[in-house]
Amino acid sequence: MKIELISLKEDIIQQCFALKVASNQMQYIASNEASWKEAMENEKVARPFAIYCDERMVGFTMFAFDEEYEDTNDRYWLWRFMIDKKLQGKGYGTAALQVIIQYFREHGANNIRLSTKGSNTTALSMYRKAGFRDTGEMNDGEIVLQLNL
């Protein structure tokens, strides 16, 4: 399984917009269209990527890299992370998360933060297995997790 992060550009944007999460997951993540709009509004910080496995688009992720932010604990966030509903449960998410973590390492991050609802037990389990730990903080009603690199 070869996972790659490809910068999201206009030529693949419609394919990315076609990726969807299962209906019971929609409460946990913004659509890829909404995420793209947010990326365009935050161009200096947002880094959107399509997730490919063996040259097939399987998901979407977006990071926040704000290296000028004073608080070093809040500089690097995993803002979005999704695998298409037709491809979930096949190991793509776990494999992609490892590639995402490596990306942060290679780009000088000292930690990665993310937040999700406490009821998003599947995602929380995956993040915790990857080494993310609860910070005790909340962000808009979501649990904040952090992985120290």
Image (cartoon, rainbow, N blue to C red):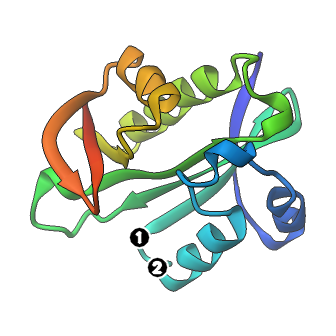
> Is 50 displayed left or right of 10 in the figure?
left
**Residue situated in front as seen by the camera: 83 or 11:** 83
Residue 147 screen position, x and y as percent:
27, 31
Name of the residue lying farthest toward the bottom = 41
SS for callout 1: loop
Answer above or below: position of 77 versus 123. Answer: below
> Does 19 sit left or right of 82 as displayed?
right
Instruction: Work out whether residue 15 or residue 68 is closer to the camera in this orientation and state it.
Output: 15
Determine crowd level at label 1: few under 14, some 14-19, many 20+ residues with C-alpha closer than 10 A.
some
Q: For residue 86, which numbered disc appears in the image? A: none
Asked whether 87 or 13 is in front, the reply is 87
Residue at 79% in and 38% down: 85
Q: Is residue 70 above or below residue 19?
A: below
The residue under label 2 is which amino acid type?
Asn
Residue holding disc 2: 42
Residue 20, visible in the rendered structure: yes
Could you tell me how far apart the alpha carbons at marks 2 and 1 are, in whole angstroms? 6 Å
Residue at image position (28%, 63%) is 140
Q: Secondary structure at mark 2?
A: loop
Indicate the quadrant containing the N terminus: top left, top right, bottom left or bottom right.
top right
Where on the picture, by quarter, is residue 58?
top right
Residue receiving disc 1: 45
Q: Is residue 149 visible?
A: no
| Residue 136 rendering spot, x and y as whole percentages | 12, 39
